Image: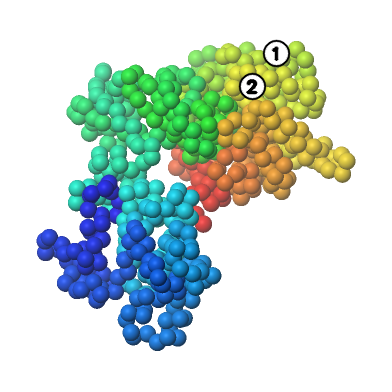
């Protein structure tokens, strides 16, 4: 357990009461391992106290300092004392220091010796009073890890006092937050951080601290809205929102890491960056929005407007790397949709295109908050001519308005001005077909790729180059041996080099690769060759690939890949395990569940799902 709170809140006093150095003011009892120790003398409590100051005896060797408590008890034989000292010295990695004096060891080593003096007594519990406070930052991190390792190995209950919340969240299985001599909340680190019991806990925990915005709860035409100086937004119906209807003024708390930096959209809040505080791999942005100061904690050295940064931020925000392929086929649509459109427009391509659009809208509305991106396959729209392209354009616009990234699966390729025209159509300034990224075919060489790369860099968009695709006959060409290596490896190296000048703050470039999930060994090889390249990974689900097959495409942050599935998600309503629980009218809900299940499977395969090994 960790006692956490500001200076003067009573942490050390509580610890001293447990140790018997002070007595409680009231009749409360102190129990340790089922034994009431309230009135026992400190020497009879079998507790070990480690102070902020190591309090080592300067005239004694490290060996004698560790064995001091054993020597004072007079009940342990010399051999037993020697055995215990050597066991503890090995545990703490100070066996080579036993003959030195305290002034001959470093601060971290001295703290290990102080811990050893406590451990050697084999107490019922350890009481640690800010033992790391006097160490420098690097030593604090090192000793924090060491204390956790020792505690887990020995299995002895430990109460650790600190005012450092990072220490508390790292070390504590349970945290008690204190203020003015009273416990404010007791819970796991997750509960303390995500479900604070009161305003003090919410604002005390977190670095940077919680953003607090005074807001008014307003009702307009039956719609519940939350209004502040920075924004006004409708409250979606959810558990707890009904209770806000009569609240008037409330305080809204937003964690800095939950603020995402994105291009301006209808669902974003305009803000000015007033200060940047680099923290190495992360950055604190001080933002001003409507006269309100906010702090955002973002990955990288500056705000994430680069395509790869936006994609990784979206994956983090949604907790999923699933991209939903919007590849609707008339024969697989819910029959009522096609029937409605034909009744309105006749038996023609306009009716089919309208049905595609309405179907896509239902999918987007159902999955927009659980996946980071969608990927419409252009061929399914182009086949219906102008009405089909209009359905694609409406789909793309609706997805963007819903906060999704859009990857246009066009596999475009040409050279010169023709390639430039394709690039401007799909990656240029906002237009009917503009997407966040486009798939391209590399087999005309760099002449056919460079116009897309240039346009993507200019407009903060991305391209995904076909490298090792998921179709069964891909190997006929992509596995051909060139200079003793398969062609797909040569392509992989080229793509990695093409993206060198367009890497974002997370290390990935805006030039990605399409790598099929049906070839896991080749995907793993490509990941080792293309460490700065985002993978767009088709072949999951209906084509046979599993979560285990795609795990190799990710880095240890859960970044590096988007896993695409189309039929297994958008048509989930028509196949088990969903068909028995959803009707054709519920196709959106079935798609949402399928997307969430797929995301969970992928995170579990990465070992990132809570409870996974």
**From mark 2 to mark 1, how far is it between C-alphas?**
15 Å
Looking at the picture, tell me which residue is in the foreground, 580 or 610. Answer: 610
Horizontal relation, residue 549 to residue 31: left or right: right
Inspect this view and state whether residue 403 appears.
Answer: yes
Residue denoted by label 1: 421
Inspect this view and state whether residue 611 appears.
Answer: no
Residue drawn at x 23%, y 49% as measured from the top left = 8
Residue drawn at x 18%, y 69% as measured from the top left = 38
> Circle 2: is it few (<14), some (14-19), or many (20+) Cα within 10 Å?
many
Horizontal relation, residue 606 to residue 228: left or right: right
Residue drawn at x 12%, y 60% as measured from the top left = 25
Q: Position of residue 366 (x, y in %)?
A: 45, 31
User: Which element type, helix, strand or loop, lies under badge 2?
Assistant: helix
Q: Position of residue 82 (x, y in %)?
A: 45, 81
Residue found at the far front of this picture: 59
- Contact between marks 2 and 1 (CB within 8 A): the answer is no
Looking at the picture, tell me which residue is in the foreground, 106 or 401. Answer: 106
Residue denoted by label 2: 457
User: Which element type, helix, strand or loop, lies under badge 1?
Assistant: helix
Residue drawn at x 33%, y 43% as measured from the top left = 205
> Circle 1: is it few (<14), some (14-19), or many (20+) Cα within 10 Å?
some
Horizontal relation, residue 228 to residue 478: left or right: left
């Amino acid at each position: 357990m960790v006692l956490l709170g500001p200076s003067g809140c009573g942490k050390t006093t509580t610890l001293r009461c447990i140790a018997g150095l002070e007595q409680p003011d009231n009749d409360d009892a102190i129990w340790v391992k089922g034994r009431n120790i309230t009135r026992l003398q400190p020497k009879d409590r079998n507790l070990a106290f480690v102070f902020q100051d190591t309090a080592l005896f300067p005239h004694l060797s490290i060996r004698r300092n560790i064995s001091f408590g054993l020597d004072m008890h007079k009940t342990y034989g010399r051999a037993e004392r020697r055995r215990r000292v050597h066991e503890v010295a090995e545990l703490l990695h100070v066996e080579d220091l036993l003959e030195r004096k305290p002034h001959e060891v470093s601060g971290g080593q001295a703290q290990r010796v102080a811990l050893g003096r406590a451990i050697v007594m084999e107490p019922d519990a350890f009481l640690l009073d800010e033992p790391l406070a006097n160490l420098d930052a690097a030593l604090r991190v090192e000793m924090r890890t060491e204390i956790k390792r020792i505690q887990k190995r020995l299995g002895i209950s430990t109460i650790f006092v600190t005012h450092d919340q990072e220490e508390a969240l790292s070390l504590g299985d349970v945290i008690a937050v204190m203020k003015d001599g009273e416990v404010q909340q007791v819970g796991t680190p997750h509960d303390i951080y995500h479900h604070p019991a009161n305003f003090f806990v919410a604002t005390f925990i977190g670095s940077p601290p919680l953003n607090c915005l005074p807001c008014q709860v307003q009702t307009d035409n039956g719609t519940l809205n939350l209004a502040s100086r920075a924004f006004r937004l409708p409250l979606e119906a959810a558990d707890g929102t009904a209770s806000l209807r009569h609240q008037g003024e409330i305080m809204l708390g937003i964690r800095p890491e939950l603020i995402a930096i994105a291009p301006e959209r209808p669902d974003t809040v305009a803000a000015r960056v007033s200060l940047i505080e680099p923290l190495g791999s992360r950055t604190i942005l001080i933002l001003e929005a409507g006269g309100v100061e906010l702090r955002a904690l973002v990955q990288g050295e500056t705000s994430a407007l680069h395509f790869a940064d936006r994609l990784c931020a979206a994956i983090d925000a949604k907790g999923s790397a699933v991209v939903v392929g919007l590849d609707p086929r008339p024969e697989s649509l819910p029959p009522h949709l096609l029937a409605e459109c034909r009744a309105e427009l006749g038996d023609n391509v306009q009716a089919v295109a309208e049905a595609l659009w309405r179907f896509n809208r239902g999918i987007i509305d159902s999955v927009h908050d659980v996946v980071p991106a969608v990927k419409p396959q252009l061929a399914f729209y182009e086949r219906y001519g102008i009405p089909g392209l209009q359905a694609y354009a409406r789909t793309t616009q609706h997805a963007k308005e819903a906060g999704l990234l859009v990857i246009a699966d066009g596999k475009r390729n040409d050279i010169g001005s023709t390639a430039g025209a394709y690039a401007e159509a799909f990656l240029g300034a906002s237009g009917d077909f503009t997407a966040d990224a486009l798939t391209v075919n590399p087999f005309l060489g760099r002449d056919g790729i460079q116009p897309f790369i240039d346009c993507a860099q200019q407009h903060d968009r991305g391209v995904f180059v076909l490298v090792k695709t998921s179709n069964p006959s891909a190997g006929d060409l992509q596995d051909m041996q060139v200079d003793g290596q398969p062609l797909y490896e040569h392509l992989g190296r080229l793509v990695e080099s093409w993206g060198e000048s367009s890497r974002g703050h997370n290390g990935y470039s805006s030039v990605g690769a399409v790598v099929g999930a049906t070839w896991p060994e080749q995907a793993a090889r490509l990941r080792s060759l293309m460490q700065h390249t985002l993978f767009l990974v088709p072949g999951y689900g209906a084509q046979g690939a599993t979560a285990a097959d795609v795990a190799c495409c990710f880095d240890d942050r859960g970044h590096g890949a988007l896993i695409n599935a189309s039929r297994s998600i958008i048509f989930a309503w028509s196949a088990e395990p969903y068909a028995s629980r959803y009707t054709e009218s519920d196709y959106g809900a079935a798609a949402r569940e399928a997307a969430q299940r797929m995301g969970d499977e992928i995170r579990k395969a990465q070992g990132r799902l809570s409870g996974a090994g």
